Amino acid sequence: MTNNVVCNNQVTVKGTVATEPVFSHEIYGKKFYMFQLKIQRPSEMTDLLPIIISKNSPFFSAINIGNKVCVIGQYRSYNKYVEIEKKAKLILTVYAREIGFLSEDEQDDSQVILEGFICKNVIYRQTPLGRKIADIMLAVNRNYGQTDYIPCIAWGKDACWAATLNVGTKLKVNGRIQSREYNKKFSDGTQETRVAYEVSINHLEWS
């Protein structure tokens, strides 16, 4: 495969197709479908990542449950209005530009390179066990004046450095996309299990 992804937003994920593609949306007569890619971490935890692909893509036929594939694309976001909460929710997906088959013995992987600007104050915190964490919202420019907003997490020394940075600082990050479940509680006392997605940073640079 040839990687033709723009340099400020590059994603390569390797895993197993976990769901059949289902219709997601249509833009200018072009239909897009979503499927889930299951990726095993080295820790043996599993991430389920939503992948978006055009129905017209020559790689669409590769999406069959159980196929081991490599997806090359971009990490994208959009806002979706949630009626029960009366507000917009940030939705994150991997937009697939290319998909190729993998051998059964090839390891799963998740790699993302992003270059953008801090667009919210960095939130620095520590876990009960003393692990240092910084939550960063990165604004990554796309073509035609669009911007993707990507939640990222820095750890340890990188978290301490990130906590000193201001809104507007340009960052380049390398990491992996990960998923985690959480319980969303509503004002009527009910709750719902949801999945959050974020970039776990392995390395960051700023200017």
Image (spheres, rainbow, N blue to C red):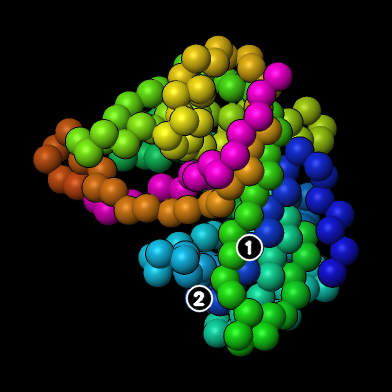
At label 1, counting other C-alpha atoms closer than 10 Å, the crowd grade (few under 14, some 14-19, many 20 or more) is many
Which residue is at 47% across, 30% downward? 157
In this picture, residue 72 sits left or right of residue 64: right
Which residue is at 51% across, 23% downward? 162
- Which structural element holds mark 2? loop
In magenta stretch: residue 197 = yes
In this picture, residue 62 sits left or right of residue 110: right
Q: Which mark is residue 13?
A: 1
Task: State the image quarter where residue 134 is shown.
Answer: top left
Which residue is at 12% across, 40% downward? 189
Q: How many marks?
A: 2
Q: Is 174 located above or below residue 139 in the figure?
A: below
In this picture, residue 74 sits left or right of residue 5: left
Distance (Cα) linking label 1 and label 2: 14 Å
Q: Amino acid at mark 1?
A: Val
Tag 2 residue: 18
The quadrant of the rendering that contains the C terminus is top right
Camera-nearest residue between 73 and 173:
173
| Main secondary-structure element of the magenta-colored stretch | strand
Q: Amino acid at mark 2?
A: Ala
Q: Is residue 63 visible?
A: no
| Residue 184: x %, y % from top left | 26, 43
The quadrant of the rendering that contains the N terminus is bottom right
Which residue is at 15% across, 45% downward? 190
Camera-nearest residue between 166 and 148:
166
Q: Residue furthest left?
A: 189
| Residue 76: x %, y % from top left | 64, 44
Q: Which mark is residue 101?
A: none
Q: Which residues are magenta?
A: 192-207
| Residue 60: x %, y % from top left | 73, 74
- Which structural element holds mark 1? strand
